[in-house]
Image (cartoon, rainbow, N blue to C red):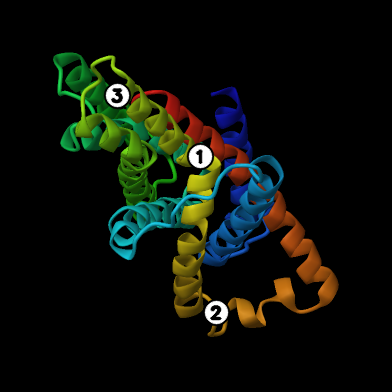
């Protein structure tokens, strides 16, 4: 949890410095390109981690196309919406306002966890959701430089984030749930073998492997969006001063890769929190 909050705060500050329109910011107006490079870097980083720390593990069967389309792709799509909309909103709202509105993510997590059957609706959950919504509403009313467009972006990102982490828990615990559902444990030898297999399956679903599986899909989605919306035109990144010469391109990529390291730490810590606790 400590790593999650530190990396999340540092990443928000880094992205605001890159994407913000203030006089002290870089004004890198390509949030989809930024997120695409982060996703590619995450795939490279997780590949290295798997090669170093998991090289002796047995290889598992790859997912079928049907399972991939029904589990991995929707989770990756929600992650793309969460990250892309969050980064885009930083061009229109302050970092403090961004942080406050983003704090409503647990509300959406609770809503989707109830819808997916991960949690039961209780009076305490309803009260928590109501109080958090009221707090955010009062904060929004007190914002001096309010941008409706920025607010819609960050609120949509928060909703996508709630759906993303609910789907992530379903993805991480999928094999374990299958093993338990097939046969209840009765204490004999045959059942103990099932439990062993269940543990192996859950090991295969560790956060590093999950991020490694999601990152290529996310990178492709971000790349398509960036090429469509950000690449060409008067202010497109193809003609951008950020990439006009090798030194400036190297400097830009250094900033982006630093943010990618923070994003990796934040995402893996979030995965571990979701895996080890309830949504």
Task: Tell me what residue is drawn at x 66 percent, y 51 percent.
Answer: 45
**Mark 3 falls on what kind of element?**
helix
In the rendering, at what x and y percent does residue 259 appear?
66, 49
Within 10 angstroms of label 1, few (less than 14), some, or many (20 or more) residues? many
**What secondary structure is found at the residue carrying circle 1?**
helix
Which numbered disc covers residue 256? none
- Residue 264: percent from the left, percent from the top? 60, 44
Whether residue 104 is visible:
no
Kindly indicate the quadrant of the structure image that contains residue 80: bottom left
* Residue occupied by mark 1: 207
Q: Earlier in the sequence, mark 3 or mark 2?
A: 3
Is 50 positioned to the left or the right of 161 in the image? Answer: right
Identify the mark at residue 231; answer none if there is no mark.
2
From this view, report whether residue 39 is shown above or below residue 168.
below
Q: Residues within 10 Å of mark 3 (few under 14, many from 20)?
A: some
Numbered badge on residue 191: 3
- Residue 157 at x, y percent in the picture: 37, 49
Mark with earlier residue (2, 1): 1
x 51%, y 71%: residue: 223
């Amino acid at each position: 949890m400590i790593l999650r909050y530190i990396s999340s705060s540092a990443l928000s500050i880094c992205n605001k410095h890159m994407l913000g329109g203030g006089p002290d910011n870089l004004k890198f107006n390509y949030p989809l390109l930024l997120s695409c490079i982060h996703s590619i870097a995450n795939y490279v980083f997780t590949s290295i981690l798997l090669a170093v720390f998991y090289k002796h593990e047995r290889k598992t069967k790859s997912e079928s196309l049907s399972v991939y389309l029904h589990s991995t792709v929707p989770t990756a799509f929600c992650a793309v919406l969460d990250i892309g909309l969050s980064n885009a909103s930083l061009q229109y709202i302050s970092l403090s306002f961004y942080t406050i509105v983003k704090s409503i993510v647990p509300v959406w997590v609770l809503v989707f966890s109830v819808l997916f059957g991960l949690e039961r609706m209780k009076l305490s959950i309803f009260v928590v959701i109501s109080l958090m919504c009221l707090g955010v509403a009062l904060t929004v009313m007190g914002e001096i430089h309010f941008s409706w467009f920025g607010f819609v972006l960050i609120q949509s990102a928060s909703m996508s984030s709630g759906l993303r982490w609910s789907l992530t828990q379903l993805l991480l615990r999928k094999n374990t749930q299958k093993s338990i559902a097939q046969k209840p444990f009765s204490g004999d030898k045959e059942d103990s073998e099932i439990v062993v297999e269940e543990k192996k399956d859950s090991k295969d679903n560790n956060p590093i492997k999950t991020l490694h599986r999601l990152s290529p899909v996310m990178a492709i989605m971000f790349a398509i969006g960036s090429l469509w919306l950000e690449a060409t035109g008067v202010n497109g990144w193809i003609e951008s001063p950020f990439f006009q010469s090798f030194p400036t391109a190297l400097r830009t990529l250094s900033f982006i890769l630093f943010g990618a390291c923070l994003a990796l730490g934040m995402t893996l810590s979030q995965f571990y929190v979701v895996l080890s606790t309830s949504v």
